[in-house]
Amino acid sequence: MRGSLLLRIITILGIYLGLKYFGGDIGRKILYPINLFVTFLHEFGHALGAVVTGGSVENVQVNQDGSGFTRTIGGNRSVTLMGGYLGSALFGNILFLVGARMKPLVKPFLGLLASGMIFTAIFWFNSMFTTGFLIGFALILFLIIWKTNFGREVLMFLGLASIIFIIQDFNVGPTSDLKKYAEIMRVLPANVWMYIWLGLALILFYFNLRIIMKEDKKGPLDDGDESFLDMPKSA
């Protein structure tokens, strides 16, 4: 089981890196919706951080250039700010874990993910582009659920691509969030918090990999105040 799973991970990683670094214009076009999806995870992390700490969400936007922003009211500002980078890292790892080791949960999780995108598109509406992208992506996920058997591979690809993107983008993507976070948590400057966030993302990925690659003796798991939070344009 471990060998076949490792081969699947290496294959998916190879496809992503091949498209990103050797795919040229075609690779960029194929990965374009994936990059927008990562932006959605980032902004959804902000939104969720506000909601779980007693705040509310005004709107969420994903821009065509890969940037995005989330407007929130109330809640714990530090948690809301962290929710973007660390929340998206957590979401990516969950996607990867479910796809790799939790086969019975693949289709329900794809459905939950698609439903979350549709909810964001409608109830946290900000632009036609954002709503169109989120609903279109969600419909593709539902199509994968109903018409294909590639749910595991799709979740693993989305999760792994999200994790890699987030780690690579640590000194670009969350810059504005880090600046605002450092203004609240004045004990350390923004560039130190940047490496703390990166370290937490790497640790999360490390332990996730350990769980994924661990042999299960009972059988593998796959059997049985108003704030304006933004994700700058990716490099």
Image: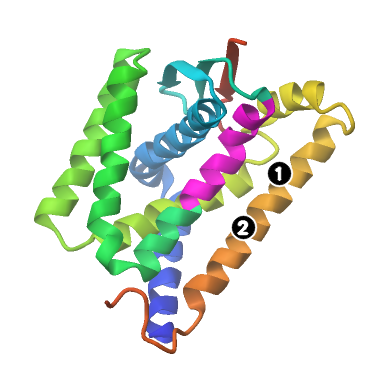
What's the magenta region? 78-92
Q: Residue at x 41, y 34 (%)?
A: 36
Q: For the image shown, how many numbered marks are present on the structure?
A: 2
Looking at the rendered structure, the secondary structure element under dot 2 is helix
Residue 6 position (above or below residue 151): below
Residue 123: image tag: none
> How would you classify the magenta stretch by its main secondary structure?
helix
Q: How is the image coloured?
A: rainbow
Question: In this image, 32 relative to 118: left or right?
Answer: right
Rounded to the nearest whole Å, what is the CA distance between mark 2 and mark 1? Answer: 11 Å
Q: Residue at x 72, y 29 (%)?
A: 178
- Would you call the spot at circle 2 few (<14 residues within 10 Å), some (14-19), or many (20 or more)? some
Question: Residue 49, image x and y in percent?
Answer: 55, 31
Q: Residue at x 30, y 52 (%)?
A: 109
Q: Specify the quadrant that holds the C terminus.
A: top right
- Quadrant where the N terminus lies? bottom left
Q: Are marks 2 and 1 in contact (CB under 8 Å)?
A: no
Q: Is residue 51 left or right of residue 114?
A: right
Residue 85 visible at all? yes
Give the residue number, with chain letter if any, for mark 2. 204
Give the residue number, with chain letter if any, for mark 1.
Answer: 197
